[in-house]
Amino acid sequence: QVQLVESGGGLVQPGGSLRLSCAASESIFSINAMGWYRQAPGKERELLAAVTSGGSTNYADSVKGRFTISRDNAKNTVYLRMNSLKPEDTAVYYCNAGTYYSRTYYPGRWGQGTQVTVSS
């Protein structure tokens, strides 16, 4: 099964930007969809963005217009560009290899997560 490794997290000031990367251990070309989730302390894990094998993207309302998901099949990597970060974006961010069907993302394999902290 594919292994996923996230990187790019860290401490950033409010209004700043980060780019998270998710490197897969094998080709992602045939993976139906890839997603990014986050989980803040005391909260449920939430889906932020998904990108299909065809390049279609979907976003949660909380990040629409600020976050951008993309996939580079040649590098077996999925990215999450995050702009205009807010303190409430602080969470552990997880990459996922799943399936997108009938407007619903079904999670599959998880990465280990990377911490993002937005604070001055």
Image (spheres, helix red, strand yellow):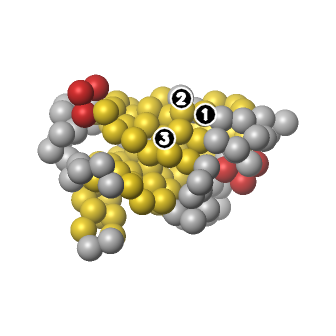
x and y, in percent, of residue 57 in the image = 38, 55
- Kindly report which numbered mark, 2 or 3, lies closer to the viewer in this rendering: 3
Q: Is residue 9 visible?
A: yes
Q: Earlier in the sequence, mark 1 or mark 3?
A: 1
Going by the numbered disc 2, the residue's amino acid type is Gly
x and y, in percent, of residue 9 in the image = 58, 32
| Picture layout, residue 101 above or below residue 70 | below
Q: Residues within 10 Å of mark 3 (few under 14, many from 20)?
A: many
Going by the numbered disc 1, the residue's amino acid type is Leu
Residue visible at 24% across and 27% down? 74
Residue at the disc numbered 3: 80
Q: Quadrant of the C terminus?
A: top right
Q: CA distance from mark 1 to mark 3?
A: 8 Å
Residue at the disc numbered 2: 8
Q: Residue 95 vs residue 34: left or right?
A: right
Q: CA distance from mark 2 to mark 1?
A: 7 Å
Residue at the disc numbered 1: 18
| Picture layout, residue 38 above or below residue 70 | below
Residue visible at 65% across and 55% down? 41
Disc 2 to disc 1: CB gap under 8 Å? yes
Of the pair 105 and 44, the residue shown nearer to us: 105
